[in-house]
Amino acid sequence: MRLRNILIIDDELSIRETLSGVLKDENYKVWTAHNEVETLRVLSQEDIHVVFLDILMKPVDGIELLKRIKERYSKVIVIMMSGHGTIETAVQATKLGAYHFIEKPLSLEKILVILENAFQSKELEEENERLRLEKYQNVDLIGRSQAISKIREFIKMVAPTNSWVLISGENGTGKEMVARNLHHLSLRFHREFVAVNCAAIPENLIESELFGYEKGAFTGAYSQKKGKFDLADGGTLFLDEIGDMSLHTQSKVLRILQEQKFERVGGTKTIEVDVRVIAATNKDLKKEIGEGRFREDLYYRLNVIPFHIPPLRERKEDIKPLAHFFLSEIALENNKGNIKITDRAYERLYQYDWPGNIRELRNLIERFAIMSQTETIDVEGVVLPTERFQSGNFSSDFRSARENFEKKFIEEKLKEFNGNISKTAQSIGVERSHLHRKIKQYEIKVD
Ligand SMILES: Nc1ncnc2c1ncn2[C@@H]1O[C@H](COP(=O)(O)OP(=O)(O)OP(=O)(O)O)[C@@H](O)[C@H]1O
Ligand SMILES: [Mg+2]
């Protein structure tokens, strides 16, 4: 598919008209907007690939708007236009993620060249993303704990059935990975796996996101758009972060899950779909129900087969094989030789409680590997985040809370540098004598 959707944002009508005229002649699909509201509306409804954005606009100027666009639509390519381009604004725009900067009066020839380049790099990016996802889908679960063997067995057993699954587990434990594996090993593997992050969809857009809309359903609905349920027809719909939906959205979702049919926004035709739903949450839904934040009927609808993924700290045997796996991936990506972790360094990894689970492990291993000067990661290279505070650890007044924190922090840092006071002081940016005083004050043992 060629990517050709363009949005022109300028408060000057003549610019919008001329530019869109030229681009349409070149067979691009063009939308225009003259302010922020229009811009965000078009972006939320259309699959825009490239944006031309004027810098001098009121009341919200182009740089501010660039920020807002990039916040929500990080993948859209933005080309800034300005009559009074200064180097500083161009630099600022580039830092904020603008792809290019062109000066008015616009040279149409130049625009077409920039646009072709932009689309080419975008296609390349999408191709990479697709390959990455494909790889992700085919990756087997790594680990040798009993827990992970159980997960593998579970996937093998449940995947070929059409049963709905509710996966629970802390952040980064591999919920999405399990869901993708379930899809991959199911009879639906040749159809789509459609992931919906329930927490990220604004409440007023939930219906058009999930059900799609018909052309003309509201101003700006220039063409029909399929919703996630449509896209997942015959395949798997992954409802992620299900515990973060508002009660209102929950009731809408429940209705469609029960009926498996719906109408598009602005449409009259009833559409029937066949989707298998896999939901995931990092919350304790029973508790959420008890506190009135989650609908019990929705819970029972989704919870046909419950499945819990234990946190990494309860299956520390998996740390080593996972670290191995991540290291080999990093070596491959960076053309590096194989990096090793010493046994002493592993000991430190086992002691840590991994609040961010496997995602955290992956990020940390990557950081260690990049920071490491040699091909071996030893204890000094294993710099772990300071232990998180349990809420019970906080004292009631500010001063003792701070002291409590300082003490923990210094203890942790000293451990990191094997009790070497000079190195610790240097690393945390205080004088050696100051650190000594603190050690004495808090009666910290240095060994
Ligand atoms: N058993 C495993 N083997 C290999 N990689 C894993 C395993 N489990 C998780 N990962 C990797 O860890 C990262 C986090 O996994 P995933 O996104 O599936 O977690 P999640 O539970 O959905 O997290 P969140 O709650 O933050 O959305 C991914 O990069 C994934 O590839
Ligand atoms: Mg996830």
Image (cartoon, helix red, strand yellow):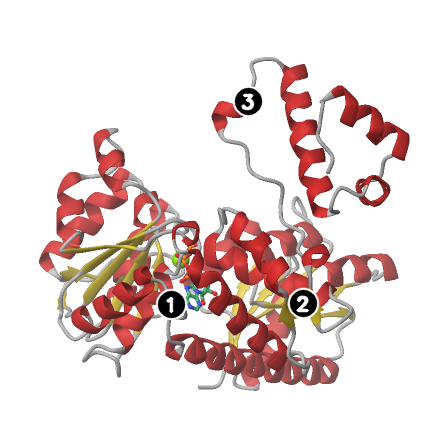
Depth check, front residue: 342 or 155 = 342
Q: Which residue is mark 3?
A: 394
Badge 3 vs badge 2, beta-carbon distance below 8 Å: no
Tell me residue 189's x, y (percent): 25, 80
Q: Which image quadrant for residue 8?
A: bottom right
Q: Measure the C-alpha gap from mark 1 to mark 3.
A: 37 Å
* Secondary structure under the numbered disc 1 in the rendered image: loop
Q: Which image quadrant for residue 153?
A: bottom left
Choose the circle earlier in sequence order: 1 or 3: 1
Tell me residue 148's x, y (percent): 33, 64
Residue 214 visible in the shown view: no
Q: Is residue 104 above or below residue 116?
A: above
Instruction: Single out the residue that lies furthest toward the front.
Output: 447
Q: Which residue is mark 2?
A: 369
Depth check, front residue: 164 or 66 = 164
Choose the circle earlier in sequence order: 1 or 2: 1
Q: Residue at x 24, y 65 (%)?
A: 229
Q: In the drawing, what numbered circle is on residue 144? A: 1
User: Tag 2: Cα neighbours inside 10 Å, few (<14), some, or many (≥20)?
Assistant: many
Q: Amino acid at mark 2?
A: Ala
Q: How many marks?
A: 3
